[in-house]
Every structure is written in C-alpha cells, then in structure tokens.
Image (cartoon, rainbow, N blue to C red):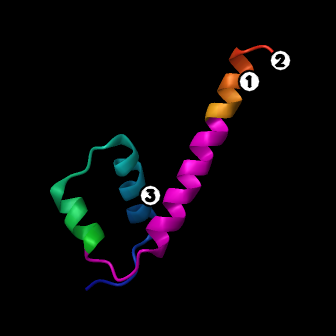
Amino acid sequence: MDKAPGFKQVLKAVLGAIVGVQSEQQRQQDFQTTTIWPYLVAGILAFVAFIVLLLLVVNWVVPG
C-alpha cells in the first residue's frame, strides 16, 4: 500500500467524485492509500463550501 495521499491527489479525487467522473486508474490509486481521513475531511469541506455557495446564490437572487 502507498503512503498517505498528497493534497493534489485528494483534491482531484474529491472533485472527480463531485462531478461523477473519474478514471479507473485514479480510482484504483485512491483505494490503495492507507488512510481515509484526507478524503473524508476534503469531502466534508467541499460539502460545506457547496452549501455556503448555494445559500449565497439564493440570497443574491431572491430579494430579502
């Protein structure tokens, strides 16, 4: 098994999961890592950022 993934690999995996498109090679590389924590943290942060962005857009479009 490989060591913990780098920032770029985690970001690529999380963004690929959000969009729903990921290569088989990338998926295999993600599952060969020894820890889930970087992916979990990045996924939670991406989810929170998405919700905040959604709330900002709704508040901007719908007057107060």
Q: Earlier in the sequence, mark 1 or mark 2?
A: 1
* Residue at (61, 41) in percent of width and height: 51
User: Can residue 55 be found in the magenta stretch?
Assistant: no
- Per the rendering, the mark at residue 59 is 1
Q: Position of residue 39 (x, y in %)?
A: 44, 66
Q: Position of residue 17 (x, y in %)?
A: 35, 50
Q: In which quadrant of the rendered view does residue 3 lie?
A: bottom left
Q: In which quadrant of the rendered view does residue 64 lie?
A: top right
Give amino acid for label 1: Asn
- Per the rendering, the mark at residue 11 is 3
Q: Earlier in the sequence, mark 1 or mark 3?
A: 3
Mark 1–mark 3 distance (CA, rounded to whole Å): 28 Å
Mark 2–mark 3 distance (CA, rounded to whole Å): 35 Å
Residue stretch rendered in magenta on the structure: 32-53
Q: Earlier in the sequence, mark 2 or mark 3?
A: 3
* Residue at (58, 56) in percent of width and height: 45
Mark 1–mark 2 distance (CA, rounded to whole Å): 7 Å
**Are the residues tagged 1 and 2 within 8 Å (C-beta)?**
yes
- The answer to whether 12 is drawn above or below residue 9 in the figure is above
